[in-house]
Image (spheres, rainbow, N blue to C red):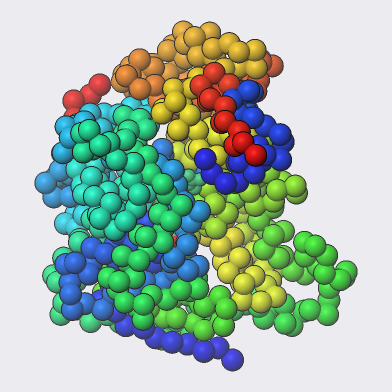
Amino acid sequence: MTISQVVIWAGQNHEPSERPYEVITTEPYVMGSHATECGAWASGPDDLAPKKIEGLPDDRRYQYYWGYNRMTTLDGLFCAGDACGANPHKFSSGSFTEGRLAGKSAVLYIMDHSDEKVEVDKTQVDSLIAKIMEPLERWEKGKYNVVTGPSYMHPVDPTKMYWKQGLFRLQKIMDECAGGWSNYYMTNEVMLNRGLELLQFLKEDFIRYAAAQDWHELMRIWELWHRILTAEAVVRHMLFRKETRWPGYYVRADYPALDDDNWHAFVNSRYDARTGQWELWKVPVIHIIEFP
Amino acid sequence: MVRVRYVDADILIIGGGMAGSGAAWETRYWCRNCRIVLAEKANINRSGAVAMGLSAINTYLGLKCKENTVEDYVKYVRGDLMGIVREDLVYDYARHVDSTVHLFDEWGLPIWPEPKTGCYVREGKWQIMIHGESYKPIVAEAARKALGDENIFNRVMVTHLLKSPSNPNRVVGAIGFNVNDGTFYVFRAKATILAAGGGSQIYRPRSQGEGLGRSWYPPWSSASSYGMLIEAGAVMTMMEARFVVPRFKDGYGPVGAYQLLLKTRISNAYGQDFWKPHIDEIRKLYGGKGNYVDLPITPTTLRVFAQRLEWIAGRGPSLMRTDETVKKARRVRQ
Ligand SMILES: Cc1cc2nc3c(=O)[nH]c(=O)nc-3n(C[C@H](O)[C@H](O)[C@H](O)COP(=O)(O)OP(=O)(O)OC[C@H]3O[C@@H](n4cnc5c(N)ncnc54)[C@H](O)[C@@H]3O)c2cc1C
């Protein structure tokens, strides 16, 4: 038994042989390695992946295979473990295994591209560094605008957003709009659209106000950015799938039943950072093992 | 003043958890003379979701003992996800996963042996029992030896992927900074393996002020994998399938050993079964083309849903009946 659980039991005078203990469902997590399958759309292995699926565009967005096992739709980028989508139940051993599969495939890729020169644009790097540093500079420049002294959370400050403030705001939006525990994991189109609207405000505020007092907080700030982008993808996907496929995980109360006629399909998406536009589409599930 | 360090490599691995460690080990196996570097925001010895150890390895088929077949495994996983998985990808890791576990065994992870058969003690059909407190340090040691400690960049938080200036579809490395001293790292790599784990703390956790940050998936799982993929324009899949797990309240201790190994039942608050009263309704709504409700192993999502119907009806909480299966430990005489 895990130490943290035993400590709770000991602290509550709980004797498991005498009394049962409560079991409850957690808040939702976004994962690709446990009993679910969020993540990157990747190429399959050449001996198993269906090749050139008939009737679908010859495009990585729809196909299952483009040469290198576990390569994402971006050249030279591989995924493994939680990062890799549509193949759940890896857990610890399977995640290590998928790392091995991606690793072998990456070696093959660099062998095939050994004469290719890797170039990085110096101006791109410099502007990225400036962007990553901005929350620290915002704090340096504005630290005398703080309204109250440091509290246990963060200073009260009308011109800055510290990581914990942004994180709590994100968590509230997702919990209340996108099927968190406070709503018994239920949602509908109205709630999801509202969530999306609130996420846009959060993104705007992050870009304008994110602040960090030291390197550690700067890590927290960029973790927050990764979480916000992920949250937006989650909400857009939940909006797109007009059915309830996994009622224990969330219920789309406006489409409360499973609908295999229309939704026996993957939902894929792509975000274009330059235009800020998202695209979502369905990809059919190809069964290589007899179904059902 | 910003200090910037450029690091050139053949392969960059982002994240030194289970998947990143596997990538480190395997890339070195196939390429002895490559430069392979790994960036990890914590310290690889105790980083990631396995940091505090595990009590079971959840995926082990037992092919050499003929315990299962890969086909049966794919069917099980597909059923648990209500019909939608990439079967090519699942089949692929499943056919190789036993060899990974045998490596862990060789490296010193204490897996419960089954002396009579020479196999492992089963927790459940797919799970085996381990003494797993040191699981991560054992696995990390293999990764460290494969790459050499000079190629492991601990305390480096990676924030963005880098693209080729001439080809917007080509990833050529990543950028990040050391969270202790602020040095920026620009990794230029021919291939990049993203293994930065999953995402917790995106939804409001059940534990608030009294236990802030306490969650089942660890609070340091920052969704960096997805954030970086999305921003770089990679195609994402199944992001709606964010999920919840039923666990012991507040401590989030594993329930597998009780349910699978000790065959402990879960009841509602009054000791009654939570499943049978709802099965007809659930079959009607979620039976689907795959007859998901009547699969040999009922999908977790449906069992969880039935329990929730009990809670909403005011017959919660769910109770793990350890009182029926756990024997009281004998007191040591003083
Ligand atoms: C409480 C709990 C119980 C579990 N029980 C079991 C079990 O009994 N059996 C089982 O087999 N599995 C179990 N699992 C699942 C298993 O731990 C995961 O499936 C597995 O660890 C996922 O591997 P991964 O490499 O994708 O992620 P992780 O192992 O989490 O590794 C991700 C790594 O990336 C690093 N990282 C993240 N962001 C960045 C960044 N921006 N820059 C640099 N580095 C970064 C992290 O620090 C971490 O080291 C459990 C998990 C938890 C949390």
Relative vertical location of residue B278 with respect to residue B226 in this rendering, above or below: above
Instruction: Provide residue B328's location: percent of width, then percent of height.
Output: 57, 27
Instruction: Spot the residue most to the left.
Output: A47
Q: Is residue A120 left or right of residue B103?
A: right
Total numbered labels placed on residues in the image: 0
- Looking at the image, residue B144 sits to the left or right of residue A43; the answer is right
The residue sitting at the bottom extreme is B1
Work out whether residue B133 can be spotted: yes
Residue A86 spot, x, y in % from top left: 34, 42
- From what the image shows, is residue B3 above or below residue A77? below
The answer to which image quadrant residue A225 occupies is bottom right
Question: Residue most toward the front?
Answer: B334
Q: Position of residue A177 (x, y in %)?
A: 63, 39
Say which of A18 and A29 sits in front: A18
Say which residue appears at 47% left-offset and 61% top-offset. Answer: B47
Q: Nearer the viewer, residue B220 or B50?
A: B50
Regarding residue A78, the answer to whether it shows in the image is no
Residue B220 in picture, x, y percent from top left: 55, 58
Q: Quadrant of the C terminus of chain A?
A: top left
The answer to which of A277 and A100 lies nearer the viewer is: A100
The residue at the point 20 percent across, 34 percent down is: B117
Q: Residue at x 61, y 33 (%)?
A: B331
B222 shown above or below B324 = below
**As rendered, which of A97 and B226 lies closer to the eye?**
A97
Q: Is residue A170 left or right of residue B29?
A: right
In percent of the image, x 18 and y 25: which residue is there?
A: A290
